[in-house]
Amino acid sequence: MPGSPVDLFLHGLKHPTAADKLRIEKELGLAGGKFSLSGFIIYLKDMITFHFGDDYYTGESVIFMISQALPYTLLLFGVAAVLSFVIGLPLGIYTSFLKGKKSEGGVISTATILNSIPFFVLAIVVWVYLAAYLKIFPITAVFPLRYITHPSLGTLKVVAYDYAMPILTLTAIESMGHLLTMRAAMVSVLGEDFITTAEAKGVKRKNIMLHHAARNAMVPMSTRMALEFAFLMSGAVIVEVIFGIPGMGTALYESTLKEDYPFAEGALFIISLIVILTYSIVDFIHAWIDPRIKV
């Protein structure tokens, strides 16, 4: 992020002087402009304890602002991640049944094209067509935070209606990625010796596909699930901005434009922490799926 936090405060003064600059640098812990071991230790302590300071513009605690934006993002991408997995996994298994058939090429081509579309491109197309042109869905997805923290049947309908377009955008792209990954994993597993043995014993093809091949193909699928969360988080910025969702993506985008260092730093730290925890959980899922893997 370009610029300096000191310059932001100096711009607010009518006639800033060198003394004002030194005073602000001291208040922000930037005096001297050199590396300080003690300052770095304080920085690490504050990050670990989630003390990100106060926002430069609102004066509110950064962790409070994050707590107001994070539920919107977790709901959006949590639902999109689950739906893309639920849709992509069965389709991937089904496509492996089509190996060698003419319809296989059409399915794989369609999935590859959809999976190659950037989030923001599909988001713009969906927004223009369904919201601006057909007016089926609202232009922006804005509703009170209590609709998420204290849901009811009425509020769930509002949330589902407002989140329909962004969830459709994310699910359409990511589910096709799951389809391709699961199909490739299934084809690879079907060439293993234990599959040949099962076929020689007279096990039905359907049982081999669902009970033998699918279980072993879940290891690369679980890896993709972790990668998917990182991809979804990276696409959060533009998707949330396009659909007007007051989540972490929109807040991070606005803080970057305003050079709001405390919030941008705190938001990136929280997002990185969530991704790291997700990767760690996937390691345990690997061991549960395949006992041969040691955590």
Image (cartoon, rainbow, N blue to C red):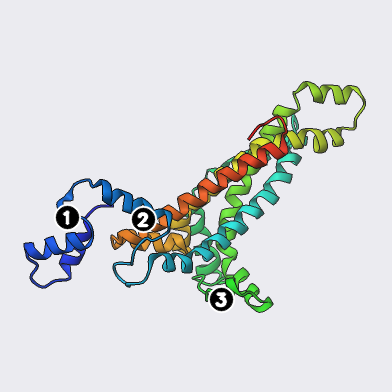
Q: Residue furthest front?
A: 38
Q: Residues within 10 Å of mark 1 (few under 14, many from 20)?
A: some
* Residue 233 in the image, given as x and y percentages of width and height: 49, 52
Name the image quarter holding the C terminus. Answer: top right
Name which residue lies at 90% across and 30% down: 203
Real-space CA distance between mark 3 and mark 1, rounded to the nearest whole angstrom: 42 Å
Question: In the rendered structure, which amino acid carries the disc numbered 3?
Answer: Arg
In this figure, which residue is indicated by the disc labeled 2? 265
Q: Is residue 79 visible?
A: yes
Look at mark 3 in the image and give the residue it sits on: 146
Q: What residue is pinned by disc 1?
A: 31
Sequence-wise first label, 3 or 2:
3
Q: Where is residue 258 drawn, in percent x and y?
A: 29, 63
Relative to 293, is 73 on the left or the right?
A: left
The mark nearer the N terminus, 2 or 1, is: 1
Toward the right, the furthest residue is 202
Q: Which mark is residue 238?
A: none
Q: Quadrant of residue 283?
A: top right
Q: CA distance from mark 3 to mark 2?
A: 26 Å
User: 112 or 47: which is nearer to us?
Assistant: 47
Disc 3 to disc 1: CB gap under 8 Å? no
Disc 3 element: helix
Q: Nearer the viewer, mark 3 or mark 1?
A: 1
| Residue 291 against residue 125 in the figure, above or below | above
Q: Does residue 244 appear anywhere in the picture?
A: no
Relative height, residue 49 to residue 138 (above, below): above
Q: Name the kind of residue labelled 1 in the image.
A: Ala
**Residue 94, percent across and down?**
76, 41
Q: Position of residue 267 (x, y in %)?
A: 41, 58
Residue at image x 58%, y 59%? 167
